[in-house]
Amino acid sequence: MTAQIGERLILDGQAVEMMFCPPLPAGHPRIIELDEETAQHDTEDTILFSTACWRGYRGTWEIRDGQLWLIDLRGRLRLQGETPLLADWFSGTLRVPRGALLHYVHMGFGSIFEEELHLRIEQGRVIDSRVIDNRGTPIDHWELVRRNLPGGEHRFAGDEA
């Protein structure tokens, strides 16, 4: 599996990239799937149709007023309607890298950066945040690969609670 492009997040008015991909609600009426030809002609972002984006789309999210909102989808999916969509279906941790890349992992979202901001979300509301400092921390490359196999890439050390 190739290292994946992250979702975009607007946080405190700044666009950052998450090393995470929040799941989308199955069958939501405002999220539609385009056929492959329409999707490829409707976006200039060709990376969305490469091995760096196995999901085939890229979302833009925003933390606003203590809540997580889905504001855009590109690639094979589109968000319909005028207003952002409150991500009240999502509970979990958003992982936002900060600083320099310390260790590259060519799988999922396994790369390690100097710091990570972890935002704990419960039914679309931010309930906690913490900064993880990875500088000086021993790195086990194969453990990072194992943790980033499909299905494990959404679990982060220390965020099990």
Image: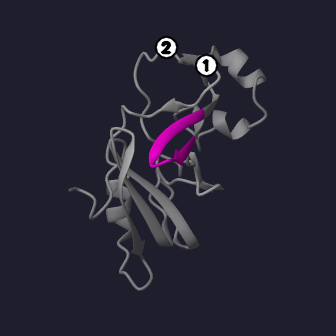
Residue, x 49% and y 54% (percent of image)? Answer: 19
Residue 106 percent location from the top left of the image: 51, 57
Nearest the viewer among 55 and 161 is 161
- Rendering coords of residue 66 (x, y %): 45, 49
Q: Residue furthest left?
A: 161
Circle 2: element type: loop
Q: Main secondary structure of the magenta part?
A: strand
**Viewer-proximal residue among 50 and 122:** 122
Tell me the magenta residue range: 61-71
Asked if residue 69 is among those painted magenta in the image, a careful observer would answer yes
Tell me the distance, in whole angstroms, between the alpha carbons under discs 1 and 2: 8 Å
In the rendered image, the residue lying farthest to the front is: 65
Give the position of the C terminus as an image quadrant. bottom left
Q: Is residue 14 visible?
A: yes
- In the displayed structure, does residue 93 sit left or right of residue 35? left
Residue 145: where, in percent of width, then height?
38, 58
Residue at (28% x, 59% y) in the render: 159
Residue at position x 60%, y 35% from top? 71
Is the residue under label 2 in contact with that under label 1 (CB below 8 Å)?
A: yes
Circle 2 is placed at which residue position? 29
The percent coordinates of residue 55 (x first, y second) are 52, 33
Residue with the most extreme bottom position? 136
N-term mark: 1 or 2: 2
Q: Which residue is mark 1?
A: 80
Q: Is residue 63 above or below residue 114?
A: above
Residue 100 magenta-highlighted: no
